[in-house]
Structure formats: C-alpha cells, structure tokens
C-alpha cells in the first residue's frame, strides 16, 4: 500500500523510513562507477524493486539474493567480467 493511503498517525514515519532506505541505495550507487549509459536513478529503483519482489519468487535466502544481485551489478552494470 502506498504511503498516501496510510493512516495519518503513521504516514510521516513510513515516509521517513522509506526515504532513509532509499538513501542507502543512493550512497551505494554513488560509490559505484556504473557504465556511462546507466542512469543512476533508474538503477536505484531497479535494485530496490528487485530486492522487494525477488526474495519471495526465487526462494533464495537474503544472503544468496545479495550475492546474486552483486553478480548482476558487476557483470552487466559495471561491465566487469
């Protein structure tokens, strides 16, 4: 459920938590040297989306999922083989 549908009593806290979570990815991506054709904004949204949905679909534990995402980022986004 999007934050604007949350009760007023928790809406500000939910939005603050979401913003804090997104800042983690902003800092992470700022430390990566992605290829020049990669848009950092959409990379961040893609990573957050993958982590939000993939865990339940693949039945990977969080550690294995992290390694899988790392492999994808390094091989396709950072262009490292």
Image (spheres, rainbow, N blue to C red):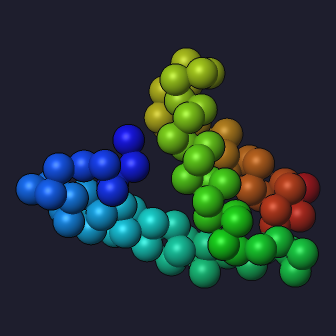
For the point 37% across and 69% down, the residue is: 19
Please state the horizontal and vertical placement of residue 55, each as a whole percent of the image: 53, 30
Q: Residue furthest left?
A: 9
For the point 62% across and 21% down, the residue is: 58
For the point 59% across and 47% down, the residue is: 49
Taking the image as shown, residue 34 lies to the left or right of residue 40, namely: right
Q: Count numbered badges in the picture.
A: 0
Task: Give the image quarter of residue 14.
Answer: bottom left
Please state the horizontal and vertical placement of residue 27, each as a whole percent of the image: 51, 77
For the point 31% across and 49% down, the residue is: 5
Please say whether residue 66 is visible from this viewpoint. no
Taking the image as shown, residue 16 lies to the left or right of residue 70, namely: left
Reply above or below: 36 against 65.
Answer: below
Reply above or below: 20 against 65.
Answer: below
Please say whether residue 74 is visible from this viewpoint. yes
Reply above or below: 68 against 32.
Answer: above
Q: In which quarter of the image is the N terminus?
A: top left
Please state the horizontal and vertical placement of residue 59, each as a whole percent of the image: 55, 18
Reply above or below: 18 against 59.
Answer: below
Q: Quadrant of the C terminus?
A: bottom right
Please state the horizontal and vertical placement of residue 67, each as a whole percent of the image: 62, 42
């Amino acid at each position: 459920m999007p934050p604007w549908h949350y009760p007023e009593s928790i809406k500000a806290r939910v939005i603050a938590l979401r913003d804090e979570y997104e800042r983690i990815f902003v800092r992470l991506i700022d430390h990566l040297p992605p290829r020049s054709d990669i848009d950092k904004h959409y990379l961040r949204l893609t990573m957050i989306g993958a982590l939000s949905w993939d865990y339940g679909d693949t039945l990977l534990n969080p550690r294995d999922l992290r390694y899988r995402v790392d492999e994808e980022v390094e091989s396709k986004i950072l262009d490292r083989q």
